[in-house]
Amino acid sequence: MSKKNFKSGIDFLIQDTKNNIEEEKIADKEKNRHQKIKGTYYFETGLLNDAKSVAYYARIPIGEVLNQALKLYLKSYGELDKARDFYNQKA
């Protein structure tokens, strides 16, 4: 008498659903995540301490504080398009 395989029953359906849900969660995280690049930069000690203070007070990561600061600066920079074009020609 052969051994019965119960993997095609309700357990199999539940396991398959769990796997699909986990794969969808991973795909959603990757889709919604902004592309980030790691770099090493030197900051003035006072500026970095102020950024850390803001991050601690606002309960957000320091990287987010720096991203927000760069976004505000770049919005106010008048010649951003020219700088981008010049940089892209160099590369």
Image (cartoon, rainbow, N blue to C red):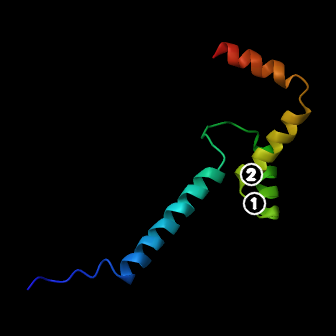
Where is residue 88, by image quadrant?
top right
Q: Amino acid at mark 1?
A: Ile
Quadrant of residue 40 in the image?
top right
- In the structure shown, which secondary structural element does the residue marked by tag 2 occupy? helix
Q: Is residue 6 visible?
A: yes
Query: Residue 27, image x and y in percent?
Result: 55, 56
User: Residue 74: horizontal and vertical position, in percent?
Assistant: 84, 34
Q: Give the side of residue 42 with respect to residue 57, left or right.
A: left
Check disc 2 and give the amino acid type. Answer: Glu
Give the farthest residue toward the bottom.
1
Residue nearer the viewer, 42 or 78 = 78
Q: Quadrant of residue 10?
A: bottom left
Q: Which mark is residue 60?
A: 1
Crowding at mark 1 (Cα within 10 Å: few <14, some 14-19, many 20+): few
Between marks 2 and 1, how big is the CA–CA gap?
7 Å
Which residue has dot 2 on it? Answer: 64
Identify the residue at image location x=82%, y=51%.
Answer: 50
Residue 8 position within the rendered picture, expressed as x and y whole percent measured from the top left: 32, 77
82 or 57: nearer the viewer: 82
Quadrant containing the C terminus is top right
Decide which of 41, 75 is in the foreground and name it: 75
> Can residue 46 be seen in the rendering of this structure?
no
Q: Which mark is residue 25?
A: none
Asked if disc 2 and disc 1 are in contact, CB closer than 8 Å, the reply is yes
Q: Residue at x 47, y 72 (%)?
A: 17
As drawn, 40 above or below 65: above
Residue 63 lies, with reference to residue 1, above or below; the image says above
